[in-house]
Image: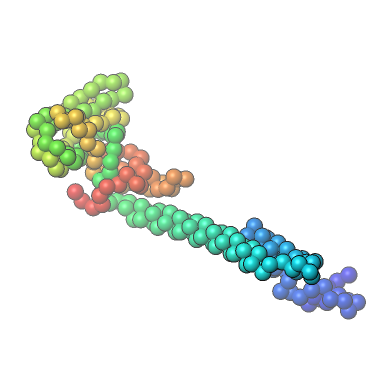
């Protein structure tokens, strides 16, 4: 039996077109809960004992609970939308860094023949400050940075001058005061890869670096 414009060929009505999209939408749990509350209140009013009617306060409490659940669902949805928006903005920002110089926090480097400039931040003065590089075989190379006052300390790693082979190196700084500052190095962003944990930058002289490890944008 064919149907045209919601009316069957025998004159019967099959429902308006506006009902079709409504039927195709999956109601959320909160909406189902709202409908359940309404049905419950109607049933309570319909079948209540006339000699002992349901207190109206109980209806208000039920409606209040329903409203709270709906508000919580709306807040959750809003939070999810904000997270998606922030993630998209972060990806766009990271993509715009391709070809730009950034400074990132690192605990390892990917050395070749090109020098790498870096910096550390000291909270306390140190009579002896040492930058230590460790290769895959555990061989350590120390770069003496000398006595330093509190504040920024610049350094340069020149693999050719130090006789270091190309490869991956762990990097750390030790001080006489026992402070172990985070190493920051500057490099050009070659490309950006999108991952489940957010954008990952390929930084020259460093390798793969998560976006949140960036500490400075622009030339050093």
Give residue 96's position: percent from left, percent from top. 34, 55
Could you tell me residue 66's position as x and y percent?
62, 62
Viewer-side residue, 103 vs 152: 152
Task: Name the residue at 30% across, 20% down.
Answer: 137
Q: Quadrant of residue 160?
A: top left
Lateral position of residue 100 relative to residue 70, left or right? left
In percent of the image, x 39 and y 54: which residue is there? 90
Q: Residue at x 82, y 73 (%)?
A: 14
Where residue 45 sits: x, y (%)?
Answer: 75, 69
Q: Quadrant of residue 129?
A: top left
Give how far across and how far down residue 92 sits, in percent.
Answer: 39, 56
How many numbered discs? 0
Q: Residue at x 47, y 45 (%)?
A: 196
Question: In the shown orientation, is residue 107 left or right of residue 157?
Answer: right
* Camera-nearest residue between 190 and 33: 33
- The answer to whether 63 appears left or right of 98 in the picture is right
Q: Is residue 2 above or below residue 218?
A: below
Instruction: Out of 39 and 172, give the one closest to the viewer.
Output: 39
- Kindly give the residue lying farthest to the right in the view shown: 10
Q: Is residue 12 left or right of residue 67?
A: right
Which part of the image, by quadrant, shows the N terminus?
bottom right
* Colouring of the image: rainbow
68 or 163: nearer the viewer: 68
Q: Is residue 193 above or below residue 111?
A: below
Q: Is residue 39 at all visible to an observer of this figure? A: no
In the picture as drawn, the residue positioned furthest to the front comes out as 51
Let me know if residue 176 appears in the view: yes
Which of the 4 image quadrants contains residue 48? bottom right
């Amino acid at each position: 039996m064919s149907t045209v414009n919601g009316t069957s060929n025998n004159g019967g009505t099959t429902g308006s077109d506006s009902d079709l999209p409504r039927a195709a939408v999956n109601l959320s749990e909160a909406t189902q809960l709202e409908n359940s509350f309404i049905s419950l209140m109607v049933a309570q009013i319909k079948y209540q004992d006339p000699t002992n009617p349901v207190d109206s306060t109980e209806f208000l409490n039920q409606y209040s609970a329903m409203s709270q659940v709906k508000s919580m669902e709306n807040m959750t949805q809003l939070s999810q939308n904000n997270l998606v928006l922030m993630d998209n903005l972060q990806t766009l920002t990271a993509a715009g860094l391709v070809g730009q110089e950034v400074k990132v926090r690192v605990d390892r480097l990917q050395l070749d023949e090109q020098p790498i400039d870096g910096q550390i931040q000291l909270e306390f003065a140190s009579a002896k400050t040492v930058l230590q590089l460790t290769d895959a075989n555990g061989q350590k190379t120390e770069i003496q940075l000398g006595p330093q006052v509190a504040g920024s300390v610049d350094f340069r790693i020149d693999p050719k001058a130090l006789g270091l082979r190309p490869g991956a190196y762990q990097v750390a700084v030790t001080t006489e005061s026992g402070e172990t500052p985070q190493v920051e190095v500057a490099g050009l962003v070659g490309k950006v890869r999108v991952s489940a944990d957010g954008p990952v930058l390929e930084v020259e002289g460093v390798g793969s670096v998560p976006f949140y490890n960036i500490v400075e944008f622009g030339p050093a």
